[in-house]
Amino acid sequence: MMLNDFTVPNKELRVTVGMRFEDETLGAQTSATNTAEKGIKPKVITVALLLPHDEADLLSELTAIAQATNADGTLVVYDIVEPAANAMNVRQVKFTDSFDVRDDYRLRAWQINFALKEYKSVPEKMEQRQTKVVGAPQVAAGEVVSGEAVNETSPPETMGSFEKILANLDSALAPKAGSDEAA
């Protein structure tokens, strides 16, 4: 597992990816099974590993990564490379909940447990796009609105590196205005 450039020590590494579906029972005190769906919550990745006492420098580095913050005080968002997480479309994560280190004298090692929460989940991105479409003014590409030109090929600033690559490929492959293909 990698978080940006840092390789998480893989001594007895165990990774679990969980997904929660939020709903509320509408039956109150009855036996009705009707529910109100409240959406799919961000995926949570729980990590457990064992780190020998003689690798204290790795524990220090992992701890520093877990508590790293941006200039505005928010936790750093990491690009994650881990097969199960990537198979479930998790590309970016933040540390969440807890970071626990328990000393196991018998094994002469630390048992480390922590959780990572998906950042900008697919359902969240879909909700944001739907909100933008519903509340967005109807303008043509290149039309000036409030002194700013609308450019449909520029990627939003909140895209991850993978989405930026796809947006650049999309704009490179799109037919140019005025060409035969655009007609």
Image: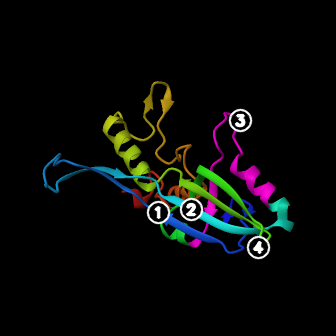
Mark identifier at residue 90: none
Q: Earlier in the sequence, mark 1 or mark 3?
A: 1
Residue at horizontal 43 percent and vertical 60 percent from the top: 19
Q: Distance between the residues labelled 1 and 3?
A: 30 Å
Kindly identify the amino acid type of the residue bearing the numbered disc 2: Thr
Look at the numbered discs 1 and 3 and tell me whether their residues touch, using CB distance below 8 Å.
no
Residue indicated by mark 4: 107
Look at the numbered discs 2 and 3 and tell me whether their residues touch, using CB distance below 8 Å.
no
Kindly identify the amino acid type of the residue bearing the numbered disc 4: Leu
Residue stretch in magenta: 59-83
Residue at horizontal 45 percent and vertical 24 percent from the top: 146
Q: How far apart are marks 1 and 4 (CA)?
A: 29 Å
The quarter of the picture where residue 48 lies is: bottom right
Q: Is residue 24 left or right of residue 139?
A: left
Kindly identify the amino acid type of the residue bearing the numbered disc 3: Ala
Residue indicated by mark 2: 46
Residue indicated by mark 3: 71
Q: Position of residue 151 (x, y in %)?
A: 49, 41
The quarter of the picture where residue 32 lies is: bottom left
Front residue of 52/9: it is: 52
Kindly identify the amino acid type of the residue bearing the numbered disc 1: Gly
Mark 2 vs mark 3, foreground winner is 2
Mark 4 vs mark 3, foreground winner is 4
Q: Is mark 1 on a helix, strand or loop?
A: strand
Residue at horizontal 41 percent and vertical 52 percent from the top: 41
Q: How crowded is mark 2: few (under 14 residues within 10 Å), some or many (20 or more)?
A: some
Q: Earlier in the sequence, mark 2 or mark 1?
A: 1
Front residue of 127/61: it is: 61
Look at the numbered discs 2 and 1 and tell me whether their residues touch, using CB distance below 8 Å.
yes
